[in-house]
Image: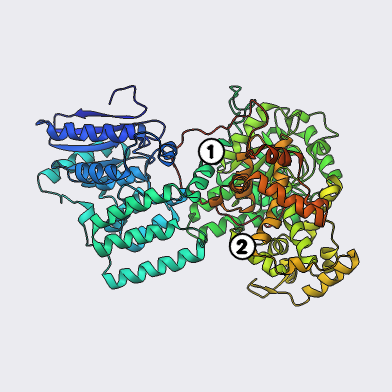
Amino acid sequence: MGSNAKGRTEMEVGDDGVAIITIINPPVNALSFDVLFSLRDSYEQALKRDDVKAIVVAGAKGKFSGGFDITAFGVLQEGKGDQPSVSNISIEVITEIFEGARKPAVAAIHGLALGGGLEVAMACHARISTPTAQLGLPELQLGIIPGFGGTQRLPRLVSLSKALEMMLTSRLIKGQEAHSLGLVDDIAPPEELIMTARKWALEILEQRRPWVHSLHRTDKLEPLAEAKEIFETARVRARKQSPNLKHPFACIDVIETGVVSGPRAGLRKEVEEFQGLLHTDTCKSLIHIFFAQRSTTKVPGVTDLGLAPRRITKVAIVGGGLMGSGIATALILSNYPVILNEVNDEFLQAGIDRVRANLQSRVEKGNMTRENFETTISLLKGVLDYESFKDVDMVIEAVTENVSLKQQIFVDLEKYCPPHCMLATNTSTIDLELIGERTKSRDRIIGAHFFSPAHVMPLLEIVRTKHTDEQVIVDLLDVGKTIKKTPIIIGNCTGFAVNRMFFPYSQAAILLAERGVDPYRIDRAISKFGMPMGPFRLCDLVGFGVAEATASQFVQVFPERTYKSVLIPLMQEDKNAGESTGKGFYVYDQNRKAGPNPELKSYIEKARSTSGISVDPKLIKLSKKDIVEMILFPVVNEACRVLAEGIAVKAADLDIAGVMGMGFPSYRGGLLFWADSLGSNYIYSRLEAWSKQYGGFFKSCGYLAERATQGATLVRNLHPNLTELIFRAPVTKSSSLIHLPHKSRAEL
């Protein structure tokens, strides 16, 4: 391949007769078609040359390969022009040329060997890895299965049960674990990796090491009867964890074909299933989420100004409740020294104890050593005043949702913190302009809205006001990435992105329940759709006090489109306040297992009569599809308003907000991506019909009406400079996108 190709390989032959073929395609040496065909050409050249005895395949700049280039999927999905065949690559290139090479080949794995990168390595006759390299087949995160022989080779190297676990969960393993499993043959430090791989290649040639074709190994495969049990167990688990998805079952079927009918049959089945899955809505949705997640940190007018993030060396947190302690945990886990401030010794000790408990949980799960625990907790210091705030670079206020309290705190912070210090608030609903009203430092005030539990949930809403300095946004973006959150930039409004979009979620459910729909049917329909839990179960988890406080904000700001009900206040009067009290829409046993509340029906009847509402016979037998639409279309409607008002930079950010903040199913592509799959006209017409029957709660916003009239998609960006920032980025790490919703929407 010429040096002008997007990706290429280079070959260098040493005096020892070993050809080093290096994959070059920055930043992670993705396997584009250019790279794969260049790799094939380099192999064929090495096989022809008499001075080449053996081959070592490596990646440039400390990364073997981050996998197949995902941008190429769009080309394959469109089916336009003369395209390379996955079958040709899997069977004719990787199996026949690479694995079938008559000269021994060894993979030298550094950094990453993911997806197609690992599949190429498994076709080599041995693998040498650094101890910390990451290996895995995370293709199922994209709605597909491995397509270059991974379903056939991985089980033969590590066993069926381990291979199924790695593929179905997209789990990555380090080089050391890969060695213990047999996926790699030896471990070497980075500086000795190539030398060790060369030596192995020559020792295979001299028959001092085995010359292994992974595809034909059988010693790691379980006996057939045991294998069938393993497949059945995997299917049962997949049905439970991924009931709406087809690709996990396709993966199991393909692996089983290889075991029962032989690896060649398995390879053919793998290619067939891969091609079919590539064109599914699930694959298109998950690829959209993949790129959307990586585009959230590209913000026109902020990240394109050439500003470098300033170094944050110390962070202070005001408030050690559930949110404050969770934020402190997230920060010290990423080596930020943290000062935790509380009003008295009792509250301070409780906050520190919460942080200790968060870390202890990691130790118990095997994710942290005792030594690491001590090092991490030593980064936390508790204080009762602001005296030690004089040298902090960032402070995060995380106290209860009380406007005057927050205003006073920010006045005090302005006095004690240095002039460069970022002043952030973790408020979930309160207008930032109000919080900073009494300060002179509005350019430093920014929202850092975490979701509970803050050290677990992946989303960080970064809220900017019209005064917030771009440098402060860039700094907080950098902190968000460092603590392994996905940050989204949101404009200042009540509820910001997640809470504002989803405030109609529980309101629509109560509206339906008061008109005759069984609340438990509503929750079942929404769970079956793919949400982690239905609106009533979520209300119980959040707690009625928090739910009411949040709802009151929306009633004040959006009175014309909030559904006002007395149901929750009526239940609260009788100490039914959600899971924390053991009783809400559900009743809870000692193990927190939820069951129906036998008193709920009478509360609904009382709320109905108080509001003068009658049962609607048409709604009693509402279908699951109609329940989902009546609950989620008002959410789509509100998301359209957020987009139209310019609160979000782009529609894809709102998709990520819904997936990571509320657990909207990623395999549906996020809220607006899913809405566009149904069509703006369909959603508009349904909402209009319901608004005529049930009032302004369902009334379509102007933007949705306009898009429906034009027959256009919802995701158009509204400002010429806010272009979709989808960029080339292969898979570099495993991160599940299915998360439980936050336990609390307000700070405690």
Q: Mark 2 belongs to which amino acid?
A: Ser
Q: Disc 2 on helix, strand or loop?
A: helix
Give residue 527's mark: 2
Q: Position of residue 388 (x, y in %)?
A: 71, 38
Choose between 238 and 400: the one closer to the eye. Answer: 238
Residue 521 pos. (x, y %)? 67, 68
| Residue 222: image location, x then y, percent | 28, 67
Q: Which element carries disc 1, helix, strand or loop?
A: helix
Q: Which mark is residue 294?
A: 1
Question: Mark 2, mark 1: which one is toward the viewer?
Answer: 2
Asked if one can make out residue 97 in the rendered structure from this viewpoint, the answer is: yes
- 421 in relation to 636, above or below: above
Where does the C terminus fall, quadrant-wise?
A: bottom right
Q: Quadrant of residue 224?
A: bottom left
Q: State how far apart marks 2 and 1 are (Cα).
A: 27 Å
Query: Dividing the image into 4 quarters, which one contains the N terminus?
Result: top left
Identity of the residue furthest to the bottom in this view: 598
- Residue 587 lies, with reference to residue 398, above or below; the image says below
* Amino acid at dot 1: Arg
Q: Is residue 108 left or right of residue 663?
A: left
Toward the viewer: 125 or 253? 253
How far from the left and from the top, in percent, is residue 67? 38, 41
Question: How packed is label 1: few (under 14 Cα within 10 Å), some, or many (20 or more)?
Answer: some
